Image: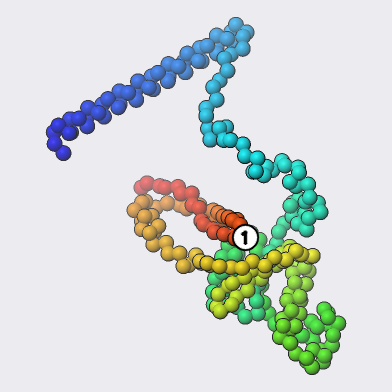
């Protein structure tokens, strides 16, 4: 940098400092005049001049009629007749049971770990095989000999699943999530509300697990700073567009840094 450029930069910095000091003095002068006018009005028994309200994002936001407000009585009027009324009215706490189909895939356990970290009060129970002689009369009123005469893999799987749902009802679970896998990849979610439904089936596509998201760049940037104490919070994003729902979750960290 030449001497002329350095001289111009120094002069510009001095002018900016003078301008900033001038603005601070004017602001302080206006504040003193405002306080004096308010004090004078109170002494004379008059109403003080109204205070100016600063413009913020909240008080300048344009009201959107399509946004659902918490005090909208019309929106929540049908909750009493809804299957989830007890949860929406905070009468009970959601308790979720997560399980898989009979033949789990290699990526199924990793996906279930993701669900357990996202959904509060979720519990994973391994899908087991139960004795058909005990399960069959309980649900279909058939004898074990009749089933063995006409074996059906689909019927057996259905009975085992019903037995699993009955177990969830007895343990006060409010919902059951079944992770279905195909070709070593989770491809569907079956969500069943207990005790009487409803049931929804969601197709999974473009599944990316956390372990597949490499965080090398973030750790390289963190290594540039001093030691920090991290307070982690999880943020879950649900984005609905047409007939597709996108779900993502991230760890939000609030850091407190200590300089040695």
Which quadrant of the view contains residue 58? top right
Q: Is residue 94 above or below residue 56?
A: below
Which quadrant of the view contains residue 234? bottom right
- Please, which residue is most extreme toward the top here? 44
Whether residue 69 appears in this view of the structure is yes
Residue visible at 53% across and 32% down? 56
Label 1: few (<14), some or many (≥20) within 10 Å? few
Q: Is residue 233 above or below residue 100?
A: above
Q: Is residue 151 above or below residue 125?
A: below
Query: Is 32 placed left or right of 49 in the picture?
Result: left
- Please, which residue is most extreme toward the right here? 141
Q: How is the image coloured?
A: rainbow
Whether residue 113 appears in this view of the structure is no
Helix, strand or loop for disc 1:
loop
Q: Position of residue 84 (x, y in %)?
A: 75, 57
- Please, which residue is most extreme toward the bottom here? 149
The residue identified by callout 1 is 243
Residue visible at 69% across and 43% down? 70
Residue visible at 59% across and 11% down? 42
Q: Position of residue 129 (x, y in %)?
A: 70, 82
Q: Is residue 172 above or below residue 77?
A: below
Query: Is 174 placed left or right of 115 in the picture?
Result: right
């Amino acid at each position: 940098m030449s001497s002329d450029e350095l001289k111009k930069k120094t002069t510009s910095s001095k002018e900016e400092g003078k301008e900033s000091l001038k603005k601070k003095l004017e602001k302080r002068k206006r504040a003193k005049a405002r306080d004096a006018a308010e004090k004078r009005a109170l002494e004379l028994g008059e109403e003080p001049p109204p205070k100016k309200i600063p413009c913020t994002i909240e008080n300048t936001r344009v009201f959107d009629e399509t946004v659902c407000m918490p005090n909208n009585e019309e929106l929540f009027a049908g909750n009493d007749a809804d299957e989830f009324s007890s949860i929406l009215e905070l009468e009970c706490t959601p308790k979720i049971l997560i399980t898989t189909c009979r033949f789990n895939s290699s990526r199924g356990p990793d996906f279930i770990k993701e669900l357990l970290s996202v959904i509060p009060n979720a519990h994973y129970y391994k899908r087991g095989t139960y004795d058909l002689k005990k399960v069959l009369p309980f649900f279909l009123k058939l004898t074990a000999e009749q089933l063995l005469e006409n074996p059906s893999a689909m019927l057996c799987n259905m009975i085992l699943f019903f037995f699993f749902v009955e177990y969830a009802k007895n343990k006060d679970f409010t919902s059951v999530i079944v992770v279905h896998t195909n070709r070593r990849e989770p491809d569907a979610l079956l969500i069943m509300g207990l005790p009487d439904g409803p049931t929804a089936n969601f197709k999974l596509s473009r599944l990316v697990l956390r372990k597949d998201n490499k965080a090398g760049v973030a750790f390289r940037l963190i290594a540039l700073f001093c030691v920090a104490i991290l307070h982690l919070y999880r943020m879950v994003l649900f984005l609905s567009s047409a007939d597709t729902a996108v779900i993502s979750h991230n760890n939000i960290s609030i850091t407190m840094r200590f300089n040695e």
